[in-house]
Image (cartoon, grey):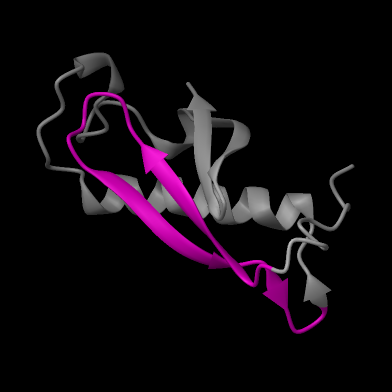
């Protein structure tokens, strides 16, 4: 469930949350701690960190060119409230790709 601890037996202290947004040339790789002062974080805490990466990407690249207008988040287009975290996929040892929808 949402309160399950993540990657407890992995030996990892941090992972990289990767966001590739359709239509944008750039991606964002965000190192993320998975161990807090209380121990390993939960699934819901990791989901919140992923949502923060989406928000950060949108702020950083607001005025960048988007090749797919339906995915553009320039002013007057998509907003953070329209995105939904679908899953996190482990694409390499410590890299997790954020999968989202609108």
Span shown in magenta: 12-38
Residue at (63%, 32%) from the top-left corner? 87
Name the spot of residue 73 as percent of width and height, x first: 27, 32
Nearest the viewer among 92 and 8 is 92
Q: Quadrant of the N terminus?
A: top right
Q: Is residue 57 above or below residue 33?
A: above
Residue 94, by quadrant, is bottom right
Q: Is residue 64 above or below residue 93?
A: above
Name the spot of residue 70 as percent of width and height, x first: 27, 15
Q: Is residue 43 above or below residue 33?
A: above
Q: Is residue 72 left or right of residue 63?
A: right
Nearest the viewer among 13 and 98 is 13
Q: Is residue 3 above or below residue 102?
A: below
Residue at (28%, 52%) from the top-left corner? 59
Q: Is residue 27 within the magenta segment? A: yes
Residue at (66%, 54%) from the top-left corner? 46
């Amino acid at each position: 469930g949402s309160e399950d601890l993540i990657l407890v037996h992995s030996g990892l202290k941090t992972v990289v949350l990767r966001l590739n947004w359709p239509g944008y040339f750039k991606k964002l790789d965000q190192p993320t701690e998975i161990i807090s002062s209380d121990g390993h974080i939960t699934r819901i805490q990791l989901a919140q960190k992923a949502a923060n990466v989406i928000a950060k990407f949108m702020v950083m690249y607001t005025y960048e060119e988007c090749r797919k207008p339906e995915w553009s988040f320039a002013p007057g287009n998509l907003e953070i409230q329209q995105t939904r975290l679908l899953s996190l996929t482990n694409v390499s040892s410590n890299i997790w790709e954020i999968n989202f929808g609108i």
